[in-house]
Image (tube, helix red, strand yellow):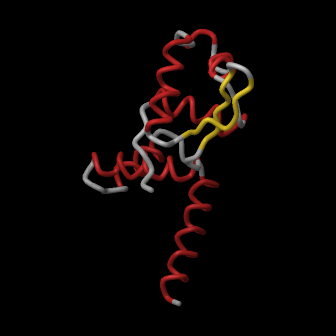
Amino acid sequence: MPVPRLSKLELQVMEILWSRGELCVRDILDAMPPKQRPAYTTIQTIVHRLEVKQAIRRSRKIGNLHLFEPVVARNAALHRLIDDFLGLIGGRAHPVMTHLIESGRMTLDDFKEAEKAFKKLAKEKES
């Protein structure tokens, strides 16, 4: 099944579920920063949308309380987000890499790790 497109708030909810595991709507809301915390009903709506998109599922029910867990893996969702973003800028990674370097968000260690991954991929393609 393809990974669904996720909005910024949906990704925020998913990040909470990925890092904390099975939670109810109230626990998801309480995990959000107080200054940026949306209404309870907003999180209910986001959770419902994530269920419809099959990004999460109801894992258990305790009384009237529903617990939710992620179905989509963090890496799969991030790959989808990056692919969508690259599609918006013509599929070219160069502008992104240049920006990351010029803004200082890409360190020399990040570059070395990327270089290792690139070399590993090149070896796999040769085999």
User: Could you tell me which residue is drawn at 52 percent across and 27 percent down?
Assistant: 47
Q: Residue at x 48, y 47 (%)?
A: 101
Query: Is residue 27 placed above or below 15 in the rendered structure?
Result: above
Would residue 45 appear left or right of 115 to someone viewing this image? left
Q: Position of residue 106 (x, y in %)?
A: 54, 47
Is residue 96 or residue 61 the one in the foreground?
61
- Work out whether 110 lies above or below 56: below
Q: Residue furthest bottom?
A: 127
Give the left or right position of residue 80, taking residue 31 as reference. Answer: left
Give above or below for 25 relative to 87. Answer: above
Q: Tell me residue 51's x, y (percent).
A: 50, 35
Q: Residue 97: x percent and y percent? A: 43, 52
> Where residue 7 appears, x then y in whole percent?
42, 32
Look at the picture and state if 67 lies above or below 89: above
Most distant residue in the front direction: 63
All told, the count of numbered labels is: 0
Image quadrant holding the N terminus, namely bottom left
Seen at 56% across and 61% down, the residue is 114
Residue 60 or 40: which is nearer the viewer? 60
- Residue at 38% across, 52% down: 83
